[in-house]
Amino acid sequence: MSAETELETTAETSEVVESDASTPEDGEAGEAAGTSSGRLERLEREGDIAADYLEELLDIADLDGDLDMDVEADRASVSIVGADLNQLVGTDGKVLEALQELTRLAVYRETGERSRLMLDVSGYRADKRSRLTKLGEEAAERVRASGEPESLEPMSPFERKVVHDAVAAAGLTSESAGVEPRRYVVVLPSEE
């Protein structure tokens, strides 16, 4: 089960998702600042382990690709860029999802801790994130104009998270409804 899947309650049929932005309370500010460098080091280590694993995999598969590592949104992020890597993405990103889970397992094997690492191949996820953000923004505008909730098509946990974030950034709320693998986002009108 992926980390995104665990973030959403599959036993329930609905949940409200609001903005991720949180700030520490006054007493926690010093604590948060002290642990951020340790968290950054842990995430960089996850990226290094993932890159080593993926480099071996590329060598075994005789594929050429360059690895870029970063830390974004409190997660390690690794991107593989190269000429013809479509076979690492697969239909609808299914191979990419499986490869991400295998990479997370490799990190877990080395660290003993679960990883929320994100993997991208040839910009597939970045492009998808951009399209989903636009979808969330457009749905929010339609809901704001009509005053009626709007249900979107079923999506993966990653896709729903991106849409929830876009809707929250537009000032509305959304919820996930349904049961895996057919969970979907419902954009809700404001309660004004």
Image (cartoon, rainbow, N blue to C red):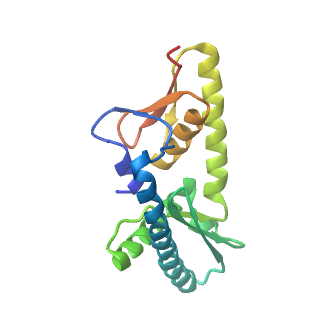
Residue 32, quarter of picture = bottom left
Looking at the figure, which quarter contains the N terminus?
Answer: bottom left
- Side of 84 relative to 35 (left or right): right
Q: How many marks?
A: 0
User: Is residue 169 placed above or below 108 in the rendered structure?
Assistant: above
x and y, in percent, of residue 181 in the image? 39, 43
Looking at the image, which residue is at 32% across and 42% down?
9
User: Is residue 9 placed above or below 79 in the rendered structure?
Assistant: above
- Side of 177 relative to 191 (left or right): left
Most extreme residue toward the left is: 11
User: Is residue 36 placed above or below 21 in the rendered structure?
Assistant: below
x and y, in percent, of residue 42 in the image? 45, 72
Q: Nearer the viewer, residue 65 or 76?
A: 76
Q: Nearer the viewer, residue 78 or 101?
A: 78
Residue 98 seen in render: no
x and y, in percent, of residue 51 in the image? 54, 78
Looking at the image, which residue is at 39% across and 49% down?
27
Q: Nearer the viewer, residue 73 or 108?
A: 73
Residue 169, quarter of picture = top right
Looking at the image, which residue is at 45% across and 70% down?
38
Looking at the image, which residue is at 62% across and 31% down?
170
Residue 25, quarter of picture = top left
x and y, in percent, of residue 114 in the image? 36, 65
Residue 78 seen in render: yes
